[in-house]
Image: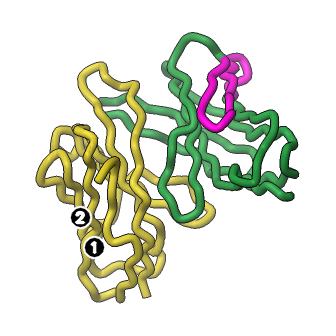
Chain colours: A yellow, B green
Amino acid sequence: ETGVTQTPRHLVMGMTNKKSLKCEQHLGHNAMYWYKQSAKKPLELMFVYSLEERVENNSVPSRFSPECPNSSHLFLHLHTLQPEDSALYLCASSQGSSGGWNNEQFFGPGTRLTVL
Amino acid sequence: AQSVTQLDSQVPVFEEAPVELRCNYSSSVSVYLFWYVQYPNQGLQLLLKYLSGSTLVKGINGFEAEFNKSQTSFHLRKPSVHISDTAEYFCAVLIIQGAQKLVFGQGTRLTINP
């Protein structure tokens, strides 16, 4: 595998379910991101992890819970979601370090989530 | 605060015609700008980026963009489009506050007609 992979690619869940989205990067990066892409809205940054520590949480509801066990893996745990949470969830990674700001973010293909 | 505005939500053009996708930004600090492309059912792929230096930036697939500081713009252009260029295009500005993060515009859907 190369680049950034995400599983599953599609997920349908009820409002009472608990599920997890997985992201894995094979690029040796040390920063990982979760974005939400809804119809007719700009991509919204949800969480940023740098060196496995969460450094950004953009007022995301607690029904979304990220986990970064190591620099290659990022999870998004989902529970008691609402229909308006249906969207494409994109994971990205980059190589960031002190002053190392100019490296692009590499995106995975996304997980298409539908909440019934 | 940094923000990005893409002025056109949809742009239809004929094959082999030129195209320009518009992007304006607002930023109170140094500006680092990006264009990403998203093909159907795929993630985002970097087309090009402006960090410093020449204001005319060339990217993949024959695209280029020009950074215009006085007009706070970073419009994307291609002289002759192909059917395969049909996709959604996103302009973004990079914010550096501890971790780096991208602020995206709303996206422009480019549709190429034969």
Q: Are marks 1 and 2 in contact (CB under 8 Å)?
A: yes
Q: Amino acid at mark 2?
A: Ser
Extreme front residue here?
A: A1
x 48%, y 76%: residue:
A84
Q: Earlier in the sequence, mark 1 or mark 2?
A: 2
Quarter-wise, where is residue A29 in the image? top left
Question: Is disc 2 on the same chain as disc 1?
Answer: yes
Say which residue label 2 marks.
Answer: A65
Indicate yes or no whether the magenta region holds residue B25: no
Q: Position of residue B4 (x, y in %)?
A: 60, 39
- Marker disc for residue A78: 1
**Callout 2: SS:** strand
x 32%, y 49%: residue:
A2
Image-based side of A38 in relation to A35, left or right: right
Magenta span of residues:
B56-73
Quarter-wise, where is residue A105 in the image? top left
How many residues crowd around disc 1 within 10 Å: few (fewer than 14), some, or many (20 or more)? Answer: some
Q: Amino acid at mark 1?
A: Leu
Image-based side of A81 in relation to B3, left or right: left
